[in-house]
């Protein structure tokens, strides 16, 4: 079976809001995107406590909080202008560059360099 990665509209560094689950309404930044699993990891949210045995890298062991992946359908981009959840669209600039923009306000999401 071949697993194909989807073209996601999320990227590392994007500001997102959780729209469902135990962290509903909280905002954070995407620190990792997992396109084959259709998931994202958001900093400081969806924390699970992992029990770790003592090892060379962690001589004490214990219970360590860890950010776990969230399904991409459970997060939404935060509009840079209105600070509310928004959908993302694509458009082309005059020079042919493809950018992402917030559909709620029309504000550009990508950092133009």
Image (cartoon, rainbow, N blue to C red):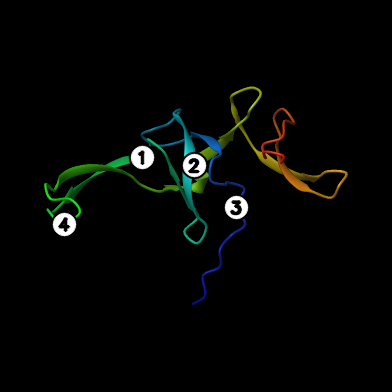
Q: Residue at x 43, y 31 (%)?
A: 24
Q: Position of residue 84 (x, y in %)?
A: 59, 26
Labels 4 and 3 touching (C-beta < 8 A) = no
> Mark 3 — residue?
8
Viewer-nearest of labels 4 and 3? 4
**Horizontal placement of 9 versus 113: left or right?**
left
Q: Secondary structure at mark 1?
A: loop
Q: Residues within 10 Å of mark 4 (few under 14, many from 20)?
A: few
Farthest residue, direction bottom? 1
Please name whichever residue, 101 or 74, is drawn nearer the observer in this view of the structure: 101
> Mark 2 — residue?
30
> Mark 4 — residue?
56
Labels 2 and 3 touching (C-beta < 8 A) = no
Q: Secondary structure at mark 3?
A: loop
Q: Residues within 10 Å of mark 2 (few under 14, many from 20)?
A: many
Q: Residue at x 37, y 35 (%)?
A: 44
Viewer-nearest of labels 2 and 4? 4
Q: 71 above or below 19?
A: below
- Of label 4 and label 3, which has the lower sequence position? 3
Estimate the spatial distance between the alpha carbons at disc 2 and disc 1, rounded to whole Å: 12 Å
């Amino acid at each position: 079976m071949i697993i194909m990665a989807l073209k996601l509209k999320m990227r590392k560094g994007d500001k997102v809001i959780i729209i469902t689950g135990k962290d509903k309404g909280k905002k954070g930044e995407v620190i990792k995107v997992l396109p084959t699993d259709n998931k994202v990891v958001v900093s400081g949210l969806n924390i699970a406590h992992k029990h770790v045995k003592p090892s060379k890298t962690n001589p004490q062991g214990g219970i360590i909080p860890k950010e776990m992946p969230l399904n991409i359908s459970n997060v939404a981009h935060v509009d840079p202008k209105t600070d509310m959840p928004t959908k993302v669209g694509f458009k082309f600039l005059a020079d042919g560059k493809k950018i992402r923009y917030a559909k709620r306000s029309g504000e550009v999401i990508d950092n133009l360099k």
